[in-house]
Amino acid sequence: MPFYQKSRDELMEELRLAREEVAALKLSESAWKERSLLLDASQSMAKIGGWQWDNERRVMLWTREVYRIHGMDPDAVSAGSQEFVEQGFDCYAEKDRGRIRSLFDRCVQHGEAYDEIFPFTPLNGGFIWIRTTAVPVVKKGRIVRVLGNIMDVSDLKKMEMELQKMQRSVEDSPVSIVITDTHGTIEYVNPAFTDVTGYSFSEAVGQNPRIMKSGMHDTHFYTELWNTLVRGDIWKGEICNRRKDGALFWEQVSIAPVKSPEGDITHFLGVKDDISDKKELDRIKEDMERVMHHDLKTPLNGIIGLPQILLMDDNLTEEQTEIIRLIEDSGRKMLDFIDQSMDFYKMETGTYVCNKCAVDAFLLMRQLVRKQARILEQKKLMISLLVDGKKGGKEDRFVVEAEEKLLYFLFSNLFMNAVEASPEGESIEIDFISTRPKCIAMCNKGEVPREIRDFFFEKYKTYGKTRGTGLGTYSAWLMARAMGYGIDMHTSDEKQNTRIRILIPCEI
């Protein structure tokens, strides 16, 4: 066979082809590395890693993300070893290790896939929740491999637990909660809704809230309500609805639009509190106030008028005259209290109209102190009336914008409260301070009990008094608010005193 010697051109061509092949191999290797890096980065961002169990060689392989989830360094462990696998099982809670081993064994031996969530403690510390899944790979009827993944689902688990907490709160809420779509069709009601309305979940879902329409509100009412919601605003108000059995009931309602991240309205959420009992109490209270204001005033006017007739008799002794004047004065006080009770109701409901004028508050307080002279004498209490920290006299004035009768009752409530709280033989200091705003400060010995300090001006809050109703300071707060005044209280355990300030805007 003759020897064939390649030409130079042929050798150069082979060399070129060899270089191209080497370059292609390098490019392929580079692409594989890039894909590997991309896979690692994707798994890291998704917090999900893959694993493989070779059932024939009995070897476990993990991706780098699985190492990270387990808190292991891939370069510091012997991959695939029994020790390596056991370390992985140790990350599960002790109570769950038997189950995860059983799931893994059944998948390896019997081909049973699994998908479970477990609490998990990485070897480098911390606590997470993981989701682990596995599926068998079967060839010719034999399980040759098991493929699986493990995913850090801590964020999802946290959201799930928050949603469960919110769901329990909604389910256990004592107020009715209703969710509708944008057309007003009910999609959800909680158990409280069923308790109040009589409509079960299945009866309410798919219906419109108009099934509870009472006929007590006109079309304009509902049109305004709907227009408020579709504008994206919250609607609040009282609605009279009808139960399934036909009975009427009142609800305090707040309805809010639920919006998507893009700002589009997707649902409406209604929170409704049954206030039927409150409405009934208000009605009874209003009726009673009306009875007191009208029916009691007629005989009381007669009682007040009779002393005026008796005083026309010139033959009365000084003692008889004093007694008759006392009867007349008591009658007038009762008449004032009846009028005041009606005024309090208006103040509470925000319907009271305050008629203010220029009033000398210092003179008004002097008159009050004179009228209470007997009570002050019984407790041996001294009263110090000050103007800007100095002793005040008859010539002093402290003019404010006020409704005189209201200011007098305000002074009276606070003054009698201070008298009652003061120990025998102490003094009460009342200072009229010409600051901006003007301030009237009343200070007495004795601290307010800790149990009611945070609720001092709230209704029916009292402590340690056998005859106290908790209405004195509350009514004082109501009257101050009606006149546009501020009022606050400070009590000192160190100084053993209590100071109440009335803050009056400088309108004069």
Image (cartoon, helix red, strand yellow):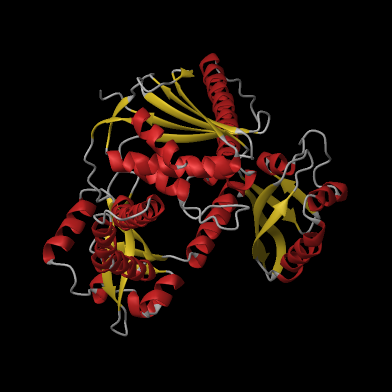
Q: Position of residue 338 (x, y in %)?
A: 32, 58
Quarter-of-image position of residue 402: top left
Q: Position of residue 62 (x, y in %)?
A: 71, 45
Q: Position of residue 194 (x, y in %)?
A: 41, 76
In the depicted view, which residue is nearer to us: 450 or 364?
Answer: 364
In the depicted view, which residue is nearer to us: 10 or 307?
Answer: 307
Above or below — where is 194 with respect to 317?
below
Q: Residue furthest bottom?
A: 245
Write the residue at 38% across / 79% down: 202
Query: Would residue 412 be found to the left or right of residue 156 on screen?
Result: left
Quarter-of-image position of residue 267: bottom left
- How many marks are shown on the rendered structure? 0
Q: Position of residue 120 (x, y in %)?
A: 73, 50
Q: Quadrant of the C terminus?
A: top left
Say if residue 46 shows up in the picture: no
In the depicted view, which residue is nearer to us: 90 or 37?
Answer: 90
